[in-house]
Image (cartoon, rainbow, N blue to C red):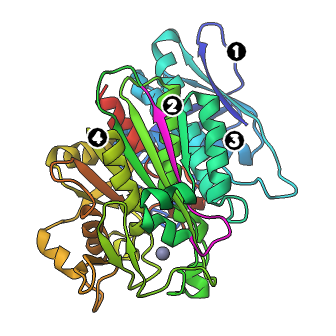
């Protein structure tokens, strides 16, 4: 349990005091652990100093890392309270308090719901200032956004026997009621009736069939909404194009895109964004059974376009195809952004540092890129030249869901497939987060497991529209 509060520096008499100081780059940076202890504690003065070893000085990202390191050190040493004097630390801008709070709240996160014994800790952080009112808004925003990130992490980390398309829809409805979002759930019967053949096909082998979950934050601006679309494969075995045992492990994270969308909607509602935002979660479980879809099946998507299934493991683009069509028909969004753990190919291209971005609109791409730099949820734009569409042209059908032959341009193939379901003139961006949604080991202010990537990025972007 971590609480951060603003306290008046003239009245507060605290125990441990923390300072964040720049230090010259370490001769041997500990690359293995990005948060290797860079802390010194002077028991006499009770001052703990967190050294930022960076040539750039104290940037927002360095503040996040230092703050995360500080709370982890406090927890490790079972120290329950600390004060940080903002003036003494030369952290006078509200953005500094925002970054500091982000680092602490995100760095303190743990997924321990299933451990029978957990060592709990309480840490109280007092931010000392002569002018608390100046920082209240920044701190409140940081708390709301980080709670959303941590919710996205937890729900992504939840195992597939706990979160499946049906239970996800129930959970989404409960959260929507709590935070004043409108929630609509379309079940597999309604989806079939509607003609959403792709999302139905992907989930038809599962005991818990597909759901399209729509969350709406009405906002107060008289504008078309921003539509956020998320892939939610609550588990992906690959289907009959079965994954190997090792590749299948961790496929509970295949719902990360949608969890980011859901968490962003909650943050948007709690912060009362003026911009209307709609979130569409395309939920399915890709299983093997007598009812499962097969390679060579021909399915008809909601758009009317037909697809021959060449690979049942390329299912994310199928559920998204119907979700993108639905978003445009239903909401005529001013901007549409989808997030998906879509391809292994994007991991080959960009690793775990940047997510792949594809966009039909340069202005949208530039805005998202900048939001990524500010939040350190970084993106890199990849191309969508029309020639790539040749790779997914079908012979018997309009499209095939996987490029054949060979292994060319896999992240682009995924994106260009999705683009076939985006109307001309619709500003759209696709973020392939397969490399960044799941941390293989601890990262700065994020433990191993789901990262909640995209919530801070999307909130930053949405706030630029206010
Ligand atoms: Zn798959």
Mark 1 or mark 3: whose residue is earlier in sequence? 1
Q: Nearer the viewer, mark 1 or mark 3?
A: 3
The local secondary structure at tag 3 comes to: helix
The answer to whether residue 156 is left or right of residue 347 is: right
Name the quadrant containing residue 42. Answer: top right
The answer to whether residue 162 is left or right of residue 67 is: right
The answer to whether residue 63 is left or right of residue 111 is: left
Task: Tell me how many marks there are.
Answer: 4
Residue at which label 2 appears = 142
Image quadrant containing the C terminus:
top left
Q: Would you say residue 127 sits in the magenta stretch? A: no
The relative height of residue 68 versus residue 338 in the rendered view (above or below) is above
Magenta part of the protein: which range? 204-218
Residue at which label 3 appears = 74
Q: Nearer the viewer, mark 1 or mark 4?
A: 4
Q: Nearer the viewer, mark 3 or mark 2?
A: 2
Mark 1 or mark 4: whose residue is earlier in sequence? 1
Instruction: Mark 3: give few (<14), some (14-19) or many (20+) Cα within 10 Å.
Output: some
Residue at which label 4 appears = 332
The relative height of residue 179 versus residue 135 in the rendered view (above or below) is below
Q: Nearer the viewer, mark 3 or mark 4?
A: 4
Q: Nearer the viewer, mark 2 or mark 1?
A: 2
Could you tell me which residue is drawn at 56 percent across and 60 percent down?
188
Distance between the alpha carbons at the discs numbered 3 and 4: 49 Å
The answer to whether residue 58 is left or right of residue 122 is: left
Residue at which label 1 appears = 13
The relative height of residue 217 versus residue 346 in the rendered view (above or below) is above
Distance between the alpha carbons at the discs numbered 2 and 1: 25 Å
Looking at the image, can residue 375 be seen? no
The local secondary structure at tag 2 comes to: helix
Pointer 3 residue Cβ closer than 8 Å to ligand 1: no
């Amino acid at each position: 349990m971590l609480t951060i509060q603003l306290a008046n520096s003239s009245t507060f008499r605290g125990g441990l005091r923390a300072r964040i100081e720049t230090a010259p780059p370490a001769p041997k940076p500990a690359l293995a652990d990005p948060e290797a202890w860079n802390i010194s504690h002077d028991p006499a003065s009770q001052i703990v100093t967190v050294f930022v070893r960076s040539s750039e000085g104290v940037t927002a990202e360095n503040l996040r890392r230092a703050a995360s390191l500080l709370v982890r050190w406090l927890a490790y040493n079972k120290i329950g309270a600390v004060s940080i004097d903002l003036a003494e630390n030369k952290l006078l801008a509200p953005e500094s308090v925002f970054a500091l709070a982000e680092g602490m709240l995100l760095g303190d996160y743990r997924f321990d719901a299933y451990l029978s014994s957990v060592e709990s800790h309480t840490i109280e952080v007092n931010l000392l200032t002569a002018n608390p009112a100046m920082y209240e808004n920044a701190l409140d925003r940081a708390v709301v956004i980080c709670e959303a990130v941590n919710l996205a992490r937890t729900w992504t980390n939840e195992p597939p026997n706990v979160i499946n398309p049906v239970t996800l829809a129930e959970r989404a409805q409960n959260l929507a009621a709590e935070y004043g979002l409108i929630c609509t759930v379309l079940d597999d019967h309604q989806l079939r009736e509607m003609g959403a053949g792709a999302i139905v096909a992907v989930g038809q082998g599962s005991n818990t069939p597909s759901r399209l979950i729509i969350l709406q934050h009405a906002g107060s601006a008289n504008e078309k909404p921003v539509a956020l679309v998320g892939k939610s494969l609550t588990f992906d075995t690959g289907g009959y194009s079965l994954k190997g045992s090792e590749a299948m492990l961790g496929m509970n994270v295949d719902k990360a895109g949608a969890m980011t969308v859901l968490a962003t909607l909650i943050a948007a509602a709690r912060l009362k964004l003026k911009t209307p935002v709609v979130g569409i979660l395309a939920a399915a479980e890709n299983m093997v059974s007598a009812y499962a879809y097969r390679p060579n099946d021909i399915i008809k998507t909601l758009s009317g376009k037909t697809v021959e299934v060449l690979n049942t493991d390329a299912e994310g683009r199928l559920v998204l195809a119907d979700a993108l069509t639905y978003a445009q028909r239903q909401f005529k969004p001013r901007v549409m952004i989808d997030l998906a753990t879509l391809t292994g190919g994007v991991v080959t291209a960009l690793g775990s540092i940047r997510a792949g971005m594809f966009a039909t609109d340069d202005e949208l791409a530039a805005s998202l890129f900048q939001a990524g730099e500010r939040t350190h949820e970084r993106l890199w734009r990849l191309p969508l030249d029309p020639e790539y569409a040749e790779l997914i042209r079908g012979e018997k059908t309009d499209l095939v869901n996987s490029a054949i032959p060979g292994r060319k341009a896999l992240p682009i193939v995924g994106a260009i497939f999705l683009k076939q379901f985006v109307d001309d003139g619709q500003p759209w961006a696709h973020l392939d987060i397969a490399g960044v949604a799941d941390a293989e080991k601890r990262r700065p202010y994020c433990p191993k497991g789901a990262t909640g990537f995209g919530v801070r990025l999307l909130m930053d972007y949405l706030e630029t529209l206010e």
